[in-house]
Amino acid sequence: MYKKPIIVFEGIEGSGKTHHINKISKYLDKKNVSYMKIREPGGSLNSEKIRRLILNKKSNFNIHTDLLLYLAARSENINLIKKFYKKKIILIDRFTDSTIAYQHYGMGVDLKIINIINRFLLRKIKVDFTFLNIVNRKNLFHRLKKRKSLNRYDQFNINFYNKVQKGFLKLARSNKKSYKIIDSNFDIKKNEDLILNQLKKLIK
């Protein structure tokens, strides 16, 4: 389908997206396939600085400051993405749909503002495919408890995570051709194979 696509891994905390993007990275390394992997917030040097600020447990930003910090982190990544766009496979751990799910569906920020700034930042850059990892309440909190340390976004209440996940599902259902929902409550090996098979189709 795509030779050098942008592939995004989305999902709320504890949904397994980072596990799967790391598995795909190892597969591509093994096959000597050229790719770039970044995370949001984070990725470039300046974006990582912003990440530390956003996720710091002592930070207490209002919802609009939060949005602008995430978009500032994305702005710092855009030149990096542009450099390799259509030249390498680009794997991204969270991207534009996370901003919509968290800041709009989760926090109530005006969707128009988010879309305007995202369009301004991305210009001609387009995501080719998204893996959405979903998780139930029991597994969400079980996995968070296993983490050595929790950041600011690991400590919201279940109502917030429910709103965000429902937002992700709305986005997935409106973009069925370029989205695949991965139920992380199922066997992890089965999901790894599912994602790998889809990846092979995308980079064929």
Image: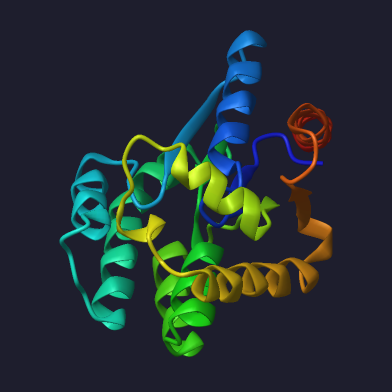
Residue positioned 43% across, 45% down in the render? 81
Q: Position of residue 3 (x, y in %)?
A: 72, 34
Does residue 176 sit above or below 11 in this rendering?
below
Residue 5: image quadrant is top right
Q: Is residue 148 left or right of residue 162?
A: left
Q: Is residue 153 left or right of residue 196?
A: left
Does residue 62 sit above or below 6 in this rendering?
below
Residue 101: image quadrant is bottom right
Residue positioned 36% across, 42% down in the render? 80
Which part of the image, by quadrant, shows the N terminus? top right
Residues 21 and 1: in front is 21
Q: Is residue 113 left or right of residue 181?
A: left
Residue 129 in view, yes or no? no
Q: Position of residue 185 (x, y in %)?
A: 74, 46
Tell me how the rendering is colored. Answer: rainbow
Does residue 121 sit above or below 25 in this rendering?
below
Residues 1 and 62: in front is 62
Residue positioned 59% across, 55% down in the render? 11
Residues 34 and 11: in front is 11
Q: Position of residue 71 (x, y in %)?
A: 33, 66
Which part of the image, by quadrant, shows the C terminus? top right
Does residue 109 sit above or below 189 in this rendering?
below
Q: Position of residue 198 (x, y in %)?
A: 81, 37
Residue 175 in view, yes or no? yes
Residue positioned 41% across, 38% down in the render? 147
User: How many numbered marks are there?
Assistant: 0
Residues 26 and 4: in front is 26
